[in-house]
Image (cartoon, rainbow, N blue to C red):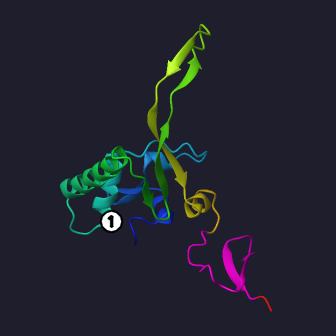
Amino acid sequence: MSIANPKEMLKPFVARANGDEVEHESASHEDGARGTLTREDIALAIHRRLEGMSRREAKRLTDLVIEEMAATLASGESLKLHDFGSFIVRTKRERAGRNPRTGAPVPIEARRVITFKASPNMKAVINGEVALTKVKKRARGRLAPQNGGAEVVRIFAP
């Protein structure tokens, strides 16, 4: 089981309380409003998935990864996580804006912003489609969904 696999990360978080399986509160909503995943939730998931790792070690690992990501973005570099997406640092130039209440012109200073672009595989997982990560670009066949898109079958062109 891979921690970085988006299919596994999107599965409902299941906790064991008195030996019974209980869904995490963020996984109980069916309408897509699942709550917010926190550092503590990530550390707890790592602790439960990796045998022999204490909660303290899992929290420290989570903090180190987030610190490294923040330092990379703060230095102006982009960050790409395979099968998840890319965080891109963009520079916006100074421009004129307006105060919505008064209509008075207000200068907006130049600044750097972070944009996120989800990978095609993450988009497919979120939409319940099959992620096509295993297909090589040089494959001669084309793909056709079978059984309502649940399975991908390779069809070879003559």
- Magenta segment's dominant SS is loop
Please state which of residues 23 and 91 is positioned toward the viewer in this rendering.
91
Task: Residue 112: tell me if it is visible.
Answer: yes
Image coords of residue 155 (percent x, y): 74, 85
Please state which of residues 123 and 71 is positioned toward the viewer in this rendering.
71
Please state which of residues 19 and 155 is positioned toward the viewer in this rendering.
155
Q: Quadrant of the N terminus?
A: bottom left
Which residue is located at x 28 percent, y 60 percent?
47
Looking at the rendering, the stretch of residues picked out in magenta corresponds to: 131-156
Task: Residue 17: tell me if it is visible.
Answer: no
| Left or right: where 105 falls relative to 26 | right
Three-letter residue code for mark 1? Arg
Residue designated by label 1:
49
Image coords of residue 152 (percent x, y): 67, 77
SS label for mark 1: helix
Is 86 magenta? The answer is no
Please state which of residues 31 and 60 is positioned toward the viewer in this rendering.
60
Image coords of residue 53 (percent x, y): 21, 64
Q: Quadrant of the C terminus?
A: bottom right
Which residue is located at x 78 percent, y 88 percent?
157
Looking at the image, the residue that sits furthest to the right is 158
